[in-house]
Image (cartoon, rainbow, N blue to C red):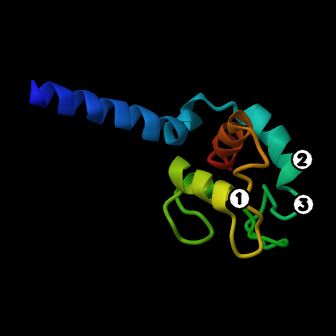
Amino acid sequence: MFRIGVALCAVALAVVTGARADNHEEGDAAKGQAAFEQRCMVCHFNDSAEKKIGPGLAGIKDGKLPSGKDATAEAVMENLNKGGNGMPAFEQMLSEEEKVNIVAYVLSL
């Protein structure tokens, strides 16, 4: 009985914590592009690795973020939510759907 309870708790925790990170698979990169162009393009190039105000994001699909971290949905979502180095935190400024779509788009660059 204890094992079943632990297993159910583990599944529930995985669903709750993983839902936000894994939603990028459900994200719509085309909608993400539109949101990126509206919110992010003022500071980031999407077609170049050159620095604008923030780093250029071209080449992320090859596996690395400009910071050198692995280009994962979790890492991109964390950057988007928390900001840093002059980038605002978008956690409260964007809907979850917008963020998931932007993550899908950024991972396609």
Where the N terminus falls, by quadrant?
top left
Disc 1 is placed on an element classified as loop
Percent position of residue 57, x then y: 71, 60
| Left or right: 62, with 93 as reference point | left
Which mark, by number, is residue 67? none
Q: Tell me if residue 31 comes above or below residue 48 in the rendering.
A: above
Q: Tell me if residue 41 comes above or below residue 18 in the rendering.
A: below
Residue position for label 3: 42
Give the quarter of the image for residue 87: bottom right
Which mark, by number, is residue 58? 1
Along the line of sight, the residue nearer the viewer: 60 or 6: 6
Give the quarter of the image for residue 105: top right
Q: Which residue is drawn at 19% across and 28% down?
A: 5
Whichever of callouts 2 and 1 sits on the residue coming sooner in the sequence is 2
Amino acid type, callout 2:
Gln
Whichever of callouts 3 and 1 sits on the residue coming sooner in the sequence is 3
Q: Tell me if residue 39 comes above or below residue 50 in the rendering.
A: above
